[in-house]
Image (cartoon, rainbow, N blue to C red):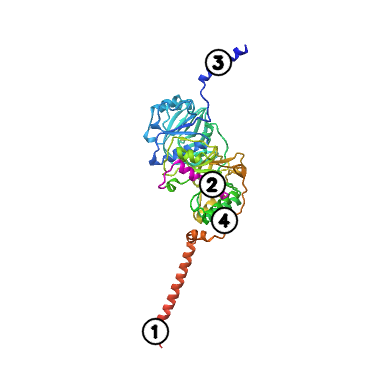
Amino acid sequence: MKRYLLLICLSILSILSIHIPVQADDNRPVLLVYDSENIYYNGSKKIDSVQRMLTADGLKIKAVMLENYRSGELSDNKYRGVVTLINWQEADLSNDSFTHDRAKFSGTKLHIGPNLQDDELEGLHAKKGMIIRQQLTLSDDGITEQIPYTNRMEYLVDVAGSDKYGVLNTQNVGNQKTLPYGVKVDSNAFLPFWNTSGLAVNCEEKLIADLFNTKTDSRPLLVINNVTPTSNLEYLDKLVDDLYRNNIPFAVSATNVEGNTNQFAYKKYMYSLRMIELKNGIIFMRVPYLYSYYTGKEINAQNLKATMSERLQLMVRSGVYPTGLSTPNHWNQDAVLGKVGLKSASNVLLLPDPKTYPKVKQTDYSQEFDKAYYVMSLKDLDKAKTTVSLTKANNLNYTLPTALNIKMPRTLSELRKVEKSVSRSELNWENPAAEDNSREMNFAKMKLEYHAGTYFVNGNEQNISDTAPVQKKHKHKEYQETGLNLILSYQGKFLTVFILVTLIGFVLLIYKGRKVYWDKFKRK
């Protein structure tokens, strides 16, 4: 009897399994379909921002241009969600195959921009309206921001039973409209446009986190970017000391090199990075600048692996232990750069893409990380036209891992501005030393781990001390190698002394000449 019951149960389960879609949320990527790069209006910046935010939400992504979409690509068993990004409104581009497949798709859907289709409106239980040539304000959490002039925008009307993320207000006198910015109805969502900075980022993060069920409160991480061996280390040390005195945790995106590592300047650079670790800072190793470093050299997996391995080992030997990688977003859309360069890190800083970059083996797919930070500028936050400064809105939480970036100051005035900007901020900064989770780097036979403020190399705890790995007295050989660098570093003082001596010489010559001249007229 029991045997028959068991067979009946198994039969029922097998029948049900035919109708139940595969639920493999951790493995299925999200399909991002955009109509155009819209390079003339810098539209690639918007695509880059959407990709980075989805990655920060812990998602794998496949990105494809609308005209390259092939029928049958979007299906429930292959993708957990689809994001439609309209990046060139005026072109009114379409693809019937994509529209048809998206209508049948039962997973999560997000539409960004205009050209909402009937099936999308049905999923949102709403109708659409249109506003033309309007100045809008965006409000959320008691803060209002004036956003750029809107020429044309679709919005939702009669939205019932929805979750809303931010409120848009028109400024028409006597005919003011109040509209939702982000809208979510069950597993369907809509954003009328996408902003890459300001208050809109918070609304976008909340919507994406809620939509894909990974909502967490996340404090922003302060990052000093563009730190290189040629940076003014005196300014870096002063900035780090200022952050340490004010008990502000921070991270540094630091570039390393392979050449000239026996020089005094390099050892001084490594010592500055080591002092950062002592002062509650962590290091992200910046991936190589390929378009400058690999001039005349083929970029392939072998060369890249050797370069990154050597740079990492040089840092470790100098007592510097990177906790992750800092990378432009395009590395995560490249089969060589991503697979070889990024897979070694459990957490990354996702920097905006530069305007131009090399494409080694570009792929549609991007990978996921334990923790990927959406990086944006602290300066842009300061410049946002808001009723309350976004750097002082400590009640404004970031839902996804977010890093606020300050550029390495190059002059004393820039240093003062950066220090003032950070000190005036009232944000509750992320403190990596207080985290429960570990940050790991695995490259070749080396495993670096950072946990609760302690560094480990291959499981062995590392003692971080303030003993300077810098020789104060140089050997003769080292002096010969670094003589030019020392002359260049003191060229300002040398020129000042030279000019002063020359001026004094001119004064003496003028005085002597004047005396000789007047002596000619004296009676002898």
Q: Which residue is mark 4?
A: 470
Residue 421 drawn above or below residue 488: above
Q: CA distance from mark 3 to mark 1?
A: 129 Å
Picture residue at 49% right of the left edge, 34% below the top: 60
Residue contact between numbered discs 3 and 1, judged by CB atoms under 8 Å? no
Number of dots carrying numbers: 4
* Dot 4 or dot 1, earlier in sequence: 4
Observer-side mark, 3 or 4, equals: 4
Residue contact between numbered discs 4 and 1, judged by CB atoms under 8 Å? no
Q: Which residue is mark 2?
A: 313
Helix, strand or loop under label 1: loop
Please name the amino acid that badge 4 sits on.
Answer: Val
Q: CA distance from mark 4 to mark 1?
A: 66 Å
Q: Which residues are magenta?
A: 295-321
Q: Which residue is mark 3?
A: 11
Residues packed near mark 1 inside 10 Å, few (<14), some (14 to 19) or many (20 plus) = few
Q: Is residue 154 magenta?
A: no
Q: CA distance from mark 2 to mark 1?
A: 79 Å
* Dot 2 or dot 3, earlier in sequence: 3
In the rendered structure, the answer to whether residue 217 lies left or right of residue 336 reads right
Helix, strand or loop under label 2: helix
Residue 229 drawn above or below residue 323: below
Q: Which residue is mark 1?
A: 521
Helix, strand or loop under label 4: loop
Q: CA distance from mark 2 to mark 4?
A: 18 Å
Q: Position of residue 149 (x, y in %)?
A: 43, 41
Residue 86 drawn above or below residue 355: above
Picture residue at 51% right of the left edge, 24% below the top: 22
